[in-house]
Image: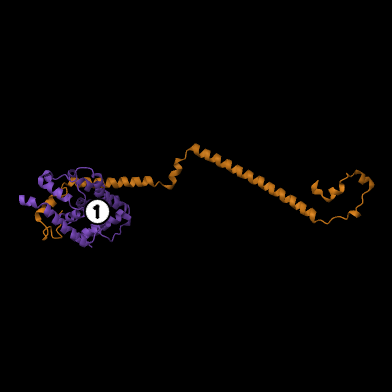
Chain colours: A purple, B orange
Amino acid sequence: MSAEALEERELVLSAQAGDHTAFAGLVHRHQRRAYAVARAIVLSHDDAEDAVQEGFLHAFRALERFRPEQAFGAWLHRIVANASLDIARRRKVRDADELPETLSSPHRDPAEAGELRARLARALDTLGERQRAVIVLHDVEGYKHAEIGSILGIPEGTARSDLHHARAHLRRQLSNLRSEK
Amino acid sequence: MNVTRNDNGQGPDADPRVTDLLRSHYAAPQDETYWNGLEERVMLGVTRSIVRINELRPAWWSGFGEFRTADIRNVGLIAATIGLLVAGATFVREAELNATARAMAQRAAVESALPLPLEDATLTSRARSRLPEDAPERYLHPLDY
């Protein structure tokens, strides 16, 4: 077991014993990855942030059920993914009557207002929730199929197939863009 | 955070330009202060959750703190009244049972005694003159009088 893994195990054990500083250490270590997982599933930065917060809160409440011999990251990512799916479903219901343009509005990106970005956002909107999550987790975050399957609770083969379909879909949707360039 | 442990978006069915677009679209905030702030917000949520849980699960002794002196006095008076009523009822009941038992014992004692031979009983004429007319009946059935 690496020094980093040992250190993390110590943090987990301390957090399980009620040490909040140790839990803060786990948050510090994992929040970027947790954000990436959440961002792959929900449509906006704000929702991803909410999902990260909800995910950590769920993890904190369920900490006593976590077995330290497991990988904390994988366990946490699954929780964050579930929180993200929950938020995405709630958002879908809430936005059912709104205009589609309001669905994709991630901020903090200078290219957001650009035509390129708008087309990509529209293309992503037309992807299924799971396929979008799979392609983002794979092509943006660098997860392997098996890891994606574990995070999203789907078989590895499904993740592989979803990636293939998502890539093909985006290629089709953005084909005219590429020919314009 | 592009960890290239897979085909890095370069597989045969992938379009590198689409991958680049996706990475730009999903770029995580780079500012360190953002992550520090998120960490603080997460921990604030955790702390609030702990406070809420503690509020929902009060300690077993906390209920006593809600009693006021007047409440305690009223409860004490009611309890004392109930206690007196129960004691009184028990006393009356006991007394009734004792009386019944005593009467039954007396009757049993009288009924089990051998009757005296009336023909042998003699009264002097002086004594007889002082006795009421129902004297034999009272002698035979003393509990009926």
Residue B44 sits in quarter: top left
- B38 or A75, nearer to the observer: A75
> For the residue carrying disc 1, how many other residues have a C-alpha within 10 Å: few (<14), some (14-19), or many (20+)?
many
Chain letter belonging to callout 1: A
Quarter that holds the N terminus of chain A: bottom left
The reply to whether residue A144 is in sight is no
- B127 or A123, nearer to the observer: A123
Q: Position of residue A50 (x, y in %)?
A: 24, 47
Residue at image position (62%, 45%) is B87
- Position of A87 with respect to A176 (left or right) is right
Q: Position of residue B134 (x, y in %)?
A: 86, 46
Residue on which disc 1 sits: A81
The residue most toward the top is B70
The reply to whether residue A164 is in sight is yes
Residue at image position (63%, 44%) is B89
Q: Is mark 1 on a helix, strand or loop?
A: helix
Q: Where is residue B84 in the image (x, y as percent from the top left)?
A: 60, 42
Task: Determine whether A18 is above or below B75 in the image.
Answer: below
The residue under label 1 is which amino acid type? Ala
The mark tally for this picture is: 1
- Position of A105 with respect to A18 (left or right) is left
Residue at image position (24%, 49%) is A88
Q: Where is residue A101 in the image (x, y as percent from the top left)?
A: 17, 44
The residue most toward the right is B125
